[in-house]
Amino acid sequence: MACSSIKDVILVEPGREEKRVKIIVLNESKIPMPLSNVEKRCAVTPSSVQRLVKKGAQLHIESGAGLLSGYADKEYVDVGGIVIDDVNSALSTADMLVSVNKPAESQLSVMKKGAIVVGHLDPFFEQPLVESIANKGLTAISVEMIPRSSRAQKMDALSSQASLAGYVMVMQAANYLPSILPMMMTPSGTIKPAKVFIIGAGVAGLQAIATAKRLGANVLAYDTRPVVAEQVESLGGKFLKIDIGETGQTKDGYAKELTDEQKAKQQDAQRDAIADSDIVITTAQLFGRKPPVLISKETLALMKPGSVVVDMAAQSGGNVEGSVAGEVAQVHGVTVIGTGNWSQAVARAATDMYANNIYNLVDEFYDTETNAFGLNLEDDILSGCVIAHNGAITNDMLTNAYKGA
Ligand code: NAD
């Protein structure tokens, strides 16, 4: 079988050859992860493989890649995928590597110049990795940098995984709470609905509000962006109004960092709401920066024993004092959940959504005439999420962040 420098060439019938983009998918459960976590998600499903193959791609999937999200090797083979054991040899001729997380350095090293690496590359906190990708002449697409535009919504992996995280955090809190979420009126007495307070009403927070409401809880929420009050109320939650002065949001809709005075005002104003809650879920993040600390140990001490706090940001610095990344801690009698990797608790749904995000990204830029991924860096979406190309880091936000600007 002949091989061009860019794509594998498939003999589809005698005398007729067809070029195909060669895409590699890793079994990420084999890649060591922080906090002894085992990655359960996969970048493709049998359904997305089927659609990619139909488009003209050739999918090489490392054996066992889908197992922990509920997909056996055979299901990929049945739709035209090629299951492989020797990833490094496949990587050396690959045009594209699609993954959930960042690949290992040893995997990047064998890839050919010009190949594309797609995944959660965590670029603000992984400068050496991004530099190494650029130095190898690979092209990096960071799914975190996909713009939050209407056109890019179908590729938005941050949103798909955050929505699931919102759901999972409520379910985990409910599991630890020594009570129930809905009101229950029985001959044995009436149980009042649980009080749930959600801090941060972005994608994860809104899904947490919706989930807690569906389970019958009373839901209160707060966000520094006042524009979300209406969305909170439309889901049946109440919005806590706190006057901390000018806050606003960036052009991409992300929260701006508060001043120290504003942070203090917020902590004071939400203290009573926290003390009165059975469950508090913090989802406050600042794009590209450490998340703000929102709940002190003193405030936790005001909560009823057995109350539950979920710190969505525990792994990236924490919204809650005393939360431990990867663990469930007890602080002043309050259960503080900092396990992280939320969407992996529902790995099948997380894989289904992520695989669709990846398919939609490839599909959007797939040039069917040349049968190649079209890297048009003038495009709104690609100019945001292609962070390394042709030996250089191509995203200004990152180059400024790396310079400490
Ligand atoms: P995020 O994960 O960066 O932050 C989560 C939430 O925390 C945000 O709502 C933020 O305002 C809030 N927050 C930050 N500091 C806080 C503090 N001190 N106290 C309370 N809350 C605080 O945000 P996200 O969920 O990724 O969403 C970011 C924005 O992008 C939102 O405006 C969202 O609606 C928008 N978005 C748009 C699209 C689209 O148009 N395609 C898709 C997804 C998200």
Image (cartoon, grey):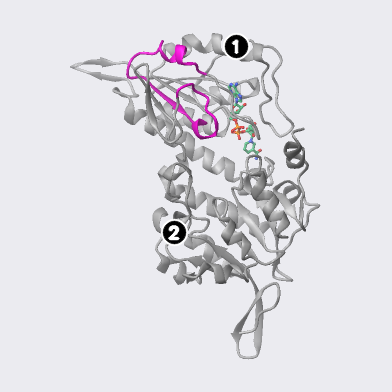
Depth order, front residue of 257/168: 257
Q: In which quarter of the image is the N terminus?
A: bottom right
The answer to which image quadrant residue 259 occupies is: top right
Instruction: Inspect this view and state whether residue 398 appears.
Output: yes
| Residue at x-position 45% and y-position 48% | 349
What label does residue 66 carry, if any? 2
What label does residue 303 carry, if any? none
Magenta range is 295-322
The answer to which image quadrant residue 174 occupies is: top left
| Residue at x-position 44% and y-position 45% | 344
**Residues under labels 1 and 2: Cα distance?**
46 Å
How many marks overall? 2
Instruction: Inspect this view and state whether residue 241 appears.
Output: no
Asked if the residue under mark 2 is in contact with the one under mark 1, i.e. CB atoms within 8 Å, the reply is no
Q: In which quarter of the image is the C terminus?
A: top right
Q: Position of residue 88 (x, y in %)?
A: 55, 68
Q: Quadrant of ligand 1?
A: top right
Would residue 145 appear left or right of 394 to someone viewing this image? Answer: left
Mark toward the start of the polypeptide (1 vs 2): 2
Q: Main secondary structure of the magenta part?
A: loop
Badge 1 element: helix
Three-letter code, disc 1:
Ala
- On screen, residue 99 above or below 400: below
Residue occupying the far bottom of the picture? 14
| Residue at x-position 72% and y-position 29% | 250
Would residue 281 appear left or right of 2 to someone viewing this image? Answer: left
Residue occupying the far left of the picture? 188
Q: Where is residue 86 in the image (x, y as percent from the top left)?
A: 50, 70
Depth order, front residue of 402/246: 402
**Residue, disc 1:** 264
For the residue carrying disc 1, how many other residues have a C-alpha within 10 Å: few (<14), some (14-19), or many (20+)? few
Distance from mark 1 CB to nearest ligand 1 atom below 8 Å: no
